[in-house]
């Protein structure tokens, strides 16, 4: 029986290693694709700079997995002030040997009524925790709102920045240690209250700049990757892993704690991927769709006018269009 268990465990580990091999291949494909497509993106950037409202129109046609996070007031900012969008894989730029899945997303804006910033850039690092969890983590990006009334995040982003600055003073982080609510600082309590009062469905798209993700430091990720590579090498050499008894936790209260409890934008990774893997590479497609919509609007303008007169104004708030219609 023991031999059967060992054999089954070895087979399972081999399957998991094979899955990792597939992931490694996919990662290398990303690395090569970034290098090959770089001159094409540079050429596209020069061309779209000549087209007014190019990126505003692209965002207007944003795919559902991105559009669902854009509130009507966000649309007003994006469609009137967004001037450029760019995505870079900063860890492999200039010959870097980092992870090509790490990305930086830069949004550039013209003068507007909401904030002073001309550029908002958010970086995402691909990291692995000691428990095997992996994904994109980030640091909050402050926005210089022109007034409290213009703050689309209703003060939540500023609180995230305060909490982040305090966390940095505490030293290196550990993804396995989740702070209990009873130990929250005044700023963390205030942030928690604002999150609960606002509701996730009503959070501004600009709350995305406050996303942090799992608390995985660069050092923890480096050690976790090294340990995993070591284990894979041992299994490849024919060493069967030993079964280990699961140690009972002295305090299992952490299981009830949500590691994203203080996230004002829990789906930050999904939005980053929607931009970097869809909106950015397919920008020309979305721009073309916007042109088709404009032509359709012109064709049926008279019919729509008649219908609007009969039905009256719609009470529901709608997102503005880039062309101002």
Image (spheres, helix red, strand yellow):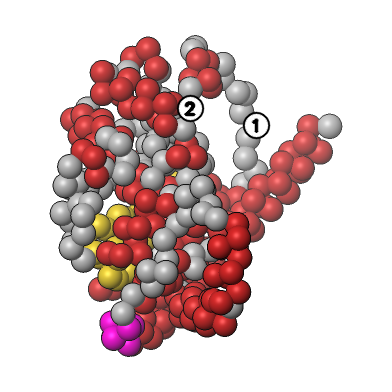
> Which residue is located at x 34 percent, y 61 percent?
78
* Numbered tag placed on residue 134 in the rendering: none
Position of 212 with respect to 275 (left or right) is left
Residue span colored magenta? 45-51
> Which residue is located at x 18 percent, y 56 percent?
117
Q: Quadrant of the N terminus?
A: top right
Q: CA distance from mark 2 to mark 1?
A: 29 Å
Position of 263 with respect to 42 (left or right) is right
Can residue 88 be spotted in the picture? no
Q: Mark 2, mark 1: which one is toward the viewer? A: 2
> Which residue is located at x 36 percent, y 81 percent?
41
* Mark 1 neighbour class, 10 Å CA radius: few under 14, some 14 to 19, many 20 or more: few
Outermost residue to the right: 1
Q: Nearer the viewer, residue 239 or 51?
A: 51
As helix, strand or loop, the secondary structure at mark 1 comes to loop
Residue 149 in the image: above or below residue 292: above
Instruction: Please tell me in which quadrant of the rendered image residue 91 appears.
Output: bottom left
Which residue was labeled with disc 2? Answer: 258
Image spot of residue 33 (x, y percent): 45, 77
Who comes first in sequence, dot 2 or dot 1?
Answer: 1
Residue 189 in the image: above or below residue 99: above
As helix, strand or loop, the secondary structure at mark 2 comes to loop
Q: Quadrant of the C terminus?
A: bottom left
* Mark 2 neighbour class, 10 Å CA radius: few under 14, some 14 to 19, many 20 or more: few
Q: Nearer the viewer, residue 133 or 287?
A: 287
Q: Nearer the viewer, residue 293 or 92?
A: 293
Outermost residue to the front: 310
> Which residue is located at x 24 percent, y 44 percent?
150
Which residue was labeled with disc 1? Answer: 243
Image spot of residue 233 (x, y percent): 53, 54
């Amino acid at each position: 029986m023991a031999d059967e268990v060992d054999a089954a465990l070895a087979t399972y580990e081999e399957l998991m290693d094979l899955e990792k091999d597939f992931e490694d291949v996919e990662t290398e494909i990303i690395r090569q694709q970034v290098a090959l497509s770089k001159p094409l993106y540079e050429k596209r950037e020069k061309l779209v700079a000549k087209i007014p409202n190019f990126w505003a129109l692209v965002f207007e046609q944003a795919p559902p997995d991105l559009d669902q996070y854009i509130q009507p007031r966000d649309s007003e900012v994006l469609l009137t002030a967004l001037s450029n969008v760019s995505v870079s894989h900063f860890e492999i730029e200039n010959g870097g040997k980092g992870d090509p899945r790490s990305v930086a997303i830069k949004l550039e804006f013209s003068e507007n009524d909401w904030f002073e910033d001309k550029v908002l850039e958010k970086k995402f690092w691909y990291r692995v925790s000691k428990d095997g969890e992996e994904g994109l983590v980030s640091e909050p990006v402050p926005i210089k709102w022109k007034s409290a009334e213009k703050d689309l995040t209703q003060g939540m982003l500023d609180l995230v920045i305060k909490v982040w600055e305090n966390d940095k003073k505490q030293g290196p982080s550990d993804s396995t240690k989740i702070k209990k609510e009873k130990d929250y600082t005044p700023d963390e309590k205030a942030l928690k209250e604002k999150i609960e009062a606002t509701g996730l469905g009503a959070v501004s798209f600009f709350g995305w700049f406050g996303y942090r993700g799992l608390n995985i430091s660069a050092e923890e990720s480096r050690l976790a990757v090294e340990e995993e590579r070591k284990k894979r090498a041992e299994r490849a050499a024919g060493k069967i892993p030993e079964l280990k008894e699961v140690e009972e936790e002295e305090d299992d209260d952490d299981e009830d704690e949500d590691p994203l409890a203080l996230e004002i934008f829990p789906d930050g990774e999904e939005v980053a991927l929607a931009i970097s893997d869809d909106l950015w590479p397919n920008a020309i497609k979305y721009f073309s769709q916007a042109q088709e919509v404009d032509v359709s609007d012109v064709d049926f303008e008279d019919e729509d006018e008649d219908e609007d007169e009969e039905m009256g104004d719609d009470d529901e708030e709608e997102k503005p269009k880039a062309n101002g219609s």
